[in-house]
């Protein structure tokens, strides 16, 4: 497997409010309270964020959090609500991709986050509290996020492609609390060999057979 870092996702260019609208859309003209309080913070020389932090990331995470809280109040478990809200944001930002497509292979139903027809790859949107340090290399990524890879390799095999493009939101960055170590939304490509896809599917099929035997199917 090739593990390629593709850089930072442009949050400011793709900023969305809690209701899914682009920043500034339907916003009344004139000065807003947020503009004034921002200037007050500057005048008081209060920090506007961690030095070197990705522009707009905390603002976007705040909107994602707001939507997650709404889901929690409706009875959705917190982790599931946060993951759903992040996927919702990414699907809004990635408007050109085919979303929530479904297929089946060998009796297994599958629904990846999105399929980019133009680039011919699967897109996966993940929000995690784990440290970004756990993805510092291919070996680290495979060790710490192998459940993600099992699913994504299966999607790739079913769709006849060899690449997953991960959009990973690191909620706490690398936990260093140093300049540039705060929250970040990064893009990675995982490119698999045909043998890797087949071996992964073989393992999936083994578990399928065991589960069917246990259930008496």
Image (cartoon, grey):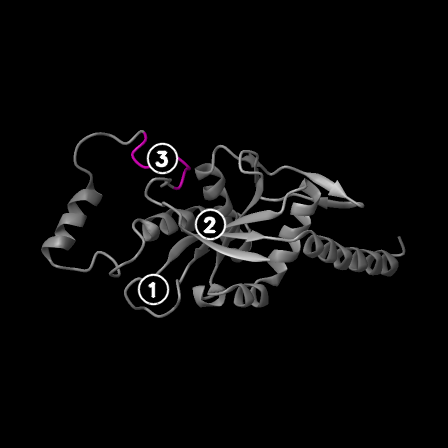
Q: CA distance from mark 1 to mark 2?
A: 24 Å
Location of residue 40 in the rendering, given as x and y in whole percent from the top left corner = 13, 51
63 relative to 132, above or below: above
Nearer-N-terminus badge (1/2): 2
Provide the residue span drawn in magenta. 18-25
Q: Are marks 1 and 2 in contact (CB under 8 Å)?
A: no
Location of residue 136 in the rendering, given as x and y in whole percent from the top left corner = 46, 65
Location of residue 198 in the rendering, given as x and y in whole percent from the top left corner = 73, 53
Label 1 vs label 2, nearer the camera = 1
Q: Is residue 33 magenta?
A: no
Q: How many residues crowd mark 2 within 10 Å: few (<14), some (14–19), many (20+)?
A: many
Q: Main secondary structure of the magenta part?
A: loop
- Which residue is found at the position 43% from the left and 53% from the top? 186
Q: Which residue is mark 3?
A: 22
Residue extending farthest right: 216
Residue extending farthest bottom: 176
Q: Which residue is mark 2?
A: 68
* Secondary structure of the residue carrying numbered label 2: helix
Q: Which mark is residue 181?
A: 1
Q: Nearer the viewer, residue 8 or 64?
A: 8
Q: How many residues crowd mark 1 within 10 Å: few (<14), some (14–19), many (20+)?
A: some
The quarter of the rendered structure image containing the N terminus is bottom right
- Which residue is found at the position 54% from the left and 33% from the top? 118
* Secondary structure of the residue carrying numbered label 3: loop
């Amino acid at each position: 497997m090739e593990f390629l870092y593709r850089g930072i996702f442009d949050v400011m260019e793709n900023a969305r409010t809690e209701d899914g609208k682009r920043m500034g859309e339907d916003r009344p003209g004139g000065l807003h309270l947020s503009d004034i309080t921002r200037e007050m913070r500057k005048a008081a020389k209060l920090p506007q964020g961690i030095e070197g932090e990705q522009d707009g990331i905390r603002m976007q995470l705040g909107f994602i959090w707001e939507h997650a809280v709404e889901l929690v109040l409706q009875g959705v478990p917190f982790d599931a609500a946060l993951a759903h809200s992040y996927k919702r944001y990414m699907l809004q930002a990635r408007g050109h991709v085919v979303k929530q497509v479904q297929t089946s292979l060998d009796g297994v139903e599958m629904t990846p986050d999105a399929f980019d027809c133009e680039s011919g790859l699967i897109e996966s949107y993940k929000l995690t509290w784990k440290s970004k340090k756990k993805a510092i290399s291919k070996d680290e990524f495979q060790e710490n996020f192998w459940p993600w890879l099992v699913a994504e390799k299966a999607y790739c095999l079913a769709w006849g492609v060899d690449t997953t493009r991960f959009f990973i939101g690191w909620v706490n960055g690398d936990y260093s609390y140093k300049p540039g170590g705060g929250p970040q939304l990064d893009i990675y490509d995982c490119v698999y060999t045909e043998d890797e896809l087949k071996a992964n599917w073989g393992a999936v099929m083994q578990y399928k057979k065991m589960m069917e035997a246990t259930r008496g199917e």
